[in-house]
Amino acid sequence: MTYQEEIDLQKRKFFALAERLDSFWNGFSGPDPEWDILYPVRSAKGRWGRCYACRYKKTTGFGFSNCLRATVDAGENKFDFDMSHIWFNRRGTLESADDVLAWLDAVEKDPAKANRRIAEEYPNDERKGVVPRSVVERYVTGYSIGKALGRAKSKAFSDIFDTGYFWREENSYVENMTANMFFEYCRIAYIASERKDDHLDRSLSGRQMYDRYSDGRYGALLDIDPDSPDEFLSWLDGKVPCDKHGGDHPWEIKRGGNTTHIDLYVHRPRHYDWYPDGEKKEKMSRTVKIGLCGHHIGRIVETVKMFLAIKKAGLPIWMSDAQSVRNRILGLDWIGIIPESDTLHRGWQDFPGDFHIADVMHFSDFGRNRRHALPFVSWEPLPVILPRTFAHSN
């Protein structure tokens, strides 16, 4: 079969699948109907797939847990088929639409039997849920932030939190901030969080350390008068010309990806306009807030060490989302479990905000300890697939 013949065959299958969906109850993504279908893979015993479909007007988009993507435009008779992210079992992937169509026939024939099979057979490795961090720490190495940080520093941070330090935002306020003051913060932070692979040269000044170890896209911070509060505030307000507009990362003091770096950030306090006209308002106009943000599980220990060292030096400092940091150190929060077919990157965003999920994992990470961890997992309900005739079958 030629490539074009295969595409034409897939087009017929997906047009048939898009039409078939209208026979089944759907949910909604905003005003648009959507379907979430769990289905058995016929060519592999015990394996299941997941098909997401969403329709806008006459266009239906399909996404599969095996990374297959397809789009059907019934109005324009157009079809798009994307297998670019599939590295293995491409032949089996080409049967995905057939698998879903066959499963919808089974669901329509006996909805109760089909959904019972989903509940009994759908693999835990492909489910989504939450589990207490204390359970993960017991059965999986590398998830105990408190152990990695050490008992003394863990207690120190927890004690600071319990004093109500983070309820008083003024603990982070600095008046008449300068670039050199910021670089001194950096020097303390680099030394406190030093790792073997940092190859830190402690003989360097704070300015030199920042120049060498930060992201490098400093946005003219190294070009202003280092001892001038006025120039720092002008730079902070974007009034200093810079050749790197649109690509500045001046706060990224430890390099990493978009979720794996550490920021030492400075910005205007949000509440300075609460002060009445006069001396206090004038003082607040020259005040900035300075804080740390590095919540990735691979960077949080460094970030907490930075915070403790800066505070010990008697300098104002803040920590973003300090309650989450405290709970993660003490093992009091929950870890999100996401399907094996999903990437861990930004996986915490898939959970409601009131779950306070900061770290995610795959259930397979428990390895041989799956059966021990299973009683402590709270699973998200699996989607139910029902034919439209189901409600009227009685």
Image (cartoon, rainbow, N blue to C red):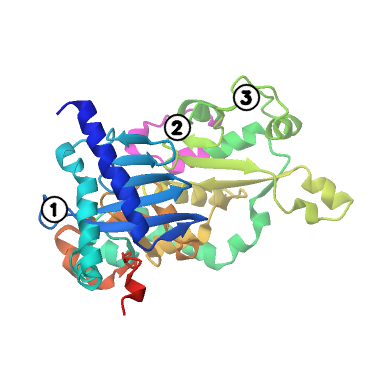
Farthest residue toward the bottom?
Answer: 394
- The stretch of residues the image draws in magenta is 187-206
| Residue 270 x, y percent position in the rendering | 70, 51
Specify the quadrant of the image occupied by residue 71.
top left
Q: Residue at x 68, y 34 (%)?
A: 236
Q: In the rendered structure, which disc, 2 or 3, sits on the residue that comes first in sequence?
A: 2
Number of other residues with Cα within 10 Å of mark 2, as a class: few under 14, some 14 to 19, many 20 or more: few
Question: Which quadrant would residue 37 be assigned to in this image?
Answer: bottom left
Dot 3 falls on a residue whose secondary structure is: loop
Secondary structure beneath dot 1 equals loop
Disc 2: which residue: 202
Give residue 115's position: percent from left, percent from top.
24, 68
Q: Residues within 10 Å of mark 3 (few under 14, many from 20)?
A: some
How far across and how far down the image is residue 10, in percent?
Answer: 25, 38
Q: Tell me, yes or no, if residue 144 can be seen here.
A: no
Label annotation for residue 220: 3
How far apart are labels 1 and 2 at the CA level?
Answer: 61 Å
Does 332 appear in magenta? no
Kindly identify the amino acid type of the residue bearing the numbered disc 2: Arg
Is 190 in the magenta? yes
Q: What element carries label 2?
A: loop
At horizontal 54% and vertical 52% (from top left) the residue drawn is 319
155 and 271: which is toward the camera: 271
Chain-order first, disc 1 or disc 2: 1
- Seen as rendered, the residue at the extreme right is 278
**Rendered position, 118 above or below 228:** below
Q: How far apart are marks 2 and 3 (CA)?
A: 24 Å
> Alpha-carbon distance for marks 3 and 1?
59 Å
Residue type at mark 3 is Ala
Where does label 1 land, which residue? 42
Q: What residue type is labelled 1?
A: Arg
- Nearer the viewer's eye, disc 2 or disc 3? 3
